[in-house]
Amino acid sequence: MLINEECINCAVCEPECPNESISEGDSIYVIDPEKCTECVGFFDEPQCIAICPVDCIVTHPDYVESREELLQKKERQHAGE
């Protein structure tokens, strides 16, 4: 996922991320693509998109991953929890 320049820095997305992949950037919030699983394995849809009041979160064009790849990433990050 990618937060674009329409972000209003409201911070509602940050606590919703089960992977802690959202953080405050220099001028807008940012999503770490290495941590983001698009909420696969947690929810039916990305929670950041569901909660965003300005619809500034889109699919990152450089990080298109299959559901299986996202599930594997989730398992690696949350192994042992």
Image (spheres, rainbow, N blue to C red):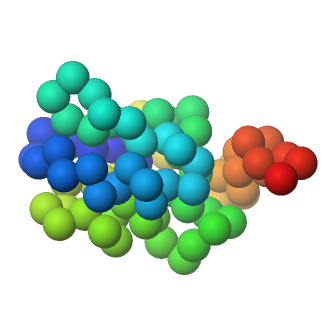
**Residue name at image x 83 percent, y 53 percent:** 81
Q: Is residue 37 left or right of residue 5?
A: right
Residue ranking furthest to the top: 26
Q: Is residue 80 above or below residue 43?
A: above
Q: Give the image quarter of residue 66.
A: bottom right
- The picture places residue 39, in percent across and down from the top left corner, at 55, 61
- The picture places residue 47, in percent across and down from the top left corner, at 43, 66
Q: Give the image quarter of residue 73.
A: top right
Q: Give the image quarter of residue 40.
A: bottom right
**Residue name at image x 63 percent, y 68 percent:** 42
Whether residue 77 is visible, yes or no, is: yes
Q: Is residue 61 left or right of residue 72?
A: left
**Residue name at image x 18 percent, y 52 percent:** 10
- The picture places residue 1, in percent across and down from the top left corner, at 40, 48
Q: Is residue 29 above or below residue 78?
A: above
| Frontmost residue, 76 versus 72 | 76
Numbered-mark total: 0
| Frontmost residue, 50 versus 80 | 80
- The picture places residue 57, in percent across and down from the top left corner, at 27, 53
Q: Is residue 59 above or below residue 63?
A: below
Q: Is residue 50 left or right of residue 17?
A: left
Q: Is residue 81 above or below residue 54?
A: above
| Frontmost residue, 29 versus 5 | 29
Whether residue 61 is visible, yes or no, is: no
**Residue name at image x 53 percent, y 44 percent:** 20
Residue ranking furthest to the right: 80
